[in-house]
Amino acid sequence: MATRWSWMCSRGCGSLGAMSRLAPRGRMNDLHYFDIQARKWHEVNVRNAPSERYGHTAVLDTQQRMWIFWAGNFWNSGWLNDVHYFDTKARQWHEVTAKNAADAPVGREGATAVLYGLEMWIFAGYNGGWLNDLHYFDIQAEMWHEVIASNAPSERYSHSAVLDAEQRMWIFGVKGRDDSDSQWVNDLHYFNLKAFNKAA
């Protein structure tokens, strides 16, 4: 696998899936997985892969489908906001057009995503300016929803996010803006997805 500095992975079934990074020869759209038990990399050769890109994000759903969103920056064409999933069982790529495509978040790179039930939650990113918006994509209904929450963290991208056992989406850092206008932040926040759904 070629050397690269920006990639994403999704975890499940004892393997790591990785697709599309910025390598010395440019943006890529290759797909690999790492067999943790065998400690060996494997490349997956499939047709109809999404276009080359970097700075995208991914989740793995309960049907072993790897969803990718906002597949980042595509050369000089700007930022993308397309949605795809890779069926790890059938080994096929599928592009999904939201039924309310006009409500899809703006294209970006460096966002984070977590899976909550059948919802892919996305936070922040960068598209020429730092963002701190929160959205989720209903995988079953194929619909986008924006969530307006109070006390949102400051704008940022290339941060980290995880979902804990209490269904809280935690984010940390890393490049963004704080009260002192710093470009590097180390603050920690969480958004309670379970409480939001109860309120809804």
Image (cartoon, rainbow, N blue to C red):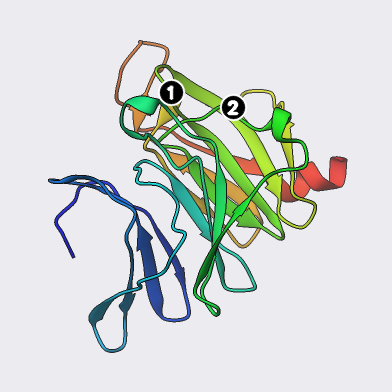
Q: What secondary structure is found at the residue carrying circle 2?
A: strand
| Label 2 packing within 10 angstroms: few (<14), some (14-19), many (20+) | many
Taking the image as drawn, is residue 154 in sight? no
Closer-to-camera residue (159/93): 93
**For the N terminus, which image quadrant?**
bottom left
Residue 91 image position (x, y, % from top left): 49, 75
Q: Please name the residue shown 49% across and 54% down the image.
A: 58
Residue 177 image position (x, y, % from top left): 39, 18
Q: What secondary structure is found at the residue carrying circle 1?
A: loop
Figure check: 193 above or below 100: below
Q: Residue furthest top?
A: 180
Q: Are marks 1 and 2 in contact (CB under 8 Å)?
A: no
- Say whether residue 173 is left or right of residue 84: left
- Say whether residue 43 is left or right of residue 133: left
**Residue wearing tag 1:** 127
**Residue wearing tag 2:** 133
Distance between the Cα atoms at labels 1 and 2? 12 Å
Q: Please name the residue shown 40% across and 26% down the image.
A: 78
